[in-house]
Image (cartoon, rainbow, N blue to C red):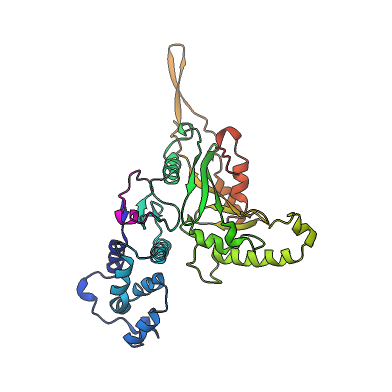
Amino acid sequence: MCLPVPKLVSTLRLSSCRLHDKLSEPEPESKSSFLLSLPAELILQICRHLPLECKASLALANRRLYHTIGSSVWKELSCPYPPNFWIRSSRSFFLRRLQRDKPDEQLYICYRCLCFHSRMDPTPRIVKRSWTQNCQVGFPWCYSEYSTGIREIYSQLNNHRDQVATPRVYEDEISSPVRGEYALTYGYNSKDLFMLRKYILRAKRIRYEKYFMVPSSFLRTSNLEICPHIAFGYDYVKGDGSINDALHEYYLKQAKSFKEVDPDQKKRGEWCPEPFTGFVCESCWLDIEIHFVGLGNMDVRISVWQHLGEFKVKPSPSRSIVCMGHLRVLVNVQRKQRVESFRTKSLRAGSLQPGTVKRAWEDLPVEEKGHDALF
């Protein structure tokens, strides 16, 4: 399954309009805003200073804005051969906004084809124009070990506990927009399925050699998507509560800590930034931990622990036949006490707490979870 931007946009545009002839009807005064009261020429001038993804979002906000700026925006977004890297990036940022507004667990953004693919489709239709430059603007993308791993791991939820395959590791390299490696695997207990993802992103030493550590802006350059609600990228606003905003505050805190370190300790390379922890996604039930390696190394190591769900429950009979000589007697079967699920236990605290999913992964039996040698 593949949903290019033009088709998706046209679907969203018409979703709020039941009939085409109602598009010309005036909107209620309660929905009017100061922006709509401005002349069309002034709106166009304002849009010239906005990023492409912001203009696209603005065009979908109102029918008048759509007719005023929509045609030029879709022309840029739907360009068969995007002239530069930033237009491709803007298209990915716009897809992320659509994904947040209309979340669908069955779809994921391919940062090579720049469209939505079905998570469970092993052979998605590739948008051929994306192969002309062979330039990915983020991660993940289709036809990779990552997409194969995600598909096969999620498919385990359709099995009963005793039908789960032996955990394996899916790993490969990331080539663009930054270089790195990734590995993902899964583990399980009697009821729940978990997944562990690890990434190593390698910054260019020549670019950051004067920094005391790899800056948080490097992660935004990677345009790496962790889940529909968490992604590293430049499509954020300071103070929006996203992981990019939290990383910026974390970096300022580490800079203050670095200034207080003894100079001799710096020369010996003994100082190391604290790990970035405490950020969770309650919608996707995942926990993130990021290690910025200090002086002398340009690696950023990301670990993501996620609870995917519960296995199917086998229907158990309420009665059983017992043979007593020549007699066959029906007896009631004593049901086993039902094991409480991970999410039920976690919600006793009111919400998902940082480190909860990580500890659950560490408590899994060694033989029932995969192991990778990434770090």
Question: Can residue 223 be spotted in the picture?
Answer: yes
Query: Where 300 sits versus 72, above or below?
Result: above
Asked if the stretch drawn in magenta spans residue 121, the answer is: yes
Asked if the stretch drawn in magenta spans residue 335, the answer is: no
Place of residue 270 in the rendered image (x, y in percent of width and height, measured from the top left): 74, 54
Question: Can residue 192 be spotted in the picture?
Answer: no
In terms of secondary structure, what is the magenta stretch mainly?
Answer: loop
Place of residue 178 in the rendered image (x, y in percent of width and height, measured from the top left): 50, 56
Q: Residue at x 58, y 40 (%)?
A: 373
The magenta stretch is: 120-134
Front one among 188 and 252: 252
How many numbered tags mark residues here? Answer: 0
**Residue projecting furthest to the front:** 206
Q: Residue at x 48, y 35 (%)?
A: 161
- Left or right for 221, reference 108: right
Place of residue 163 in the rendered image (x, y in percent of width and height, measured from the top left): 45, 32
- Left or right for 149, reference 209: left
Q: Residue at x 50, y 68 (%)?
A: 236
- Left or right for 308, reference 350: left
Query: Where 189 sits versus 347, above or below?
Result: above
Front one among 299 and 276: 299
Q: Quadrant of residue 327?
A: top left
**Residue projecting furthest to the top:** 325
Front one among 241 and 40: 40
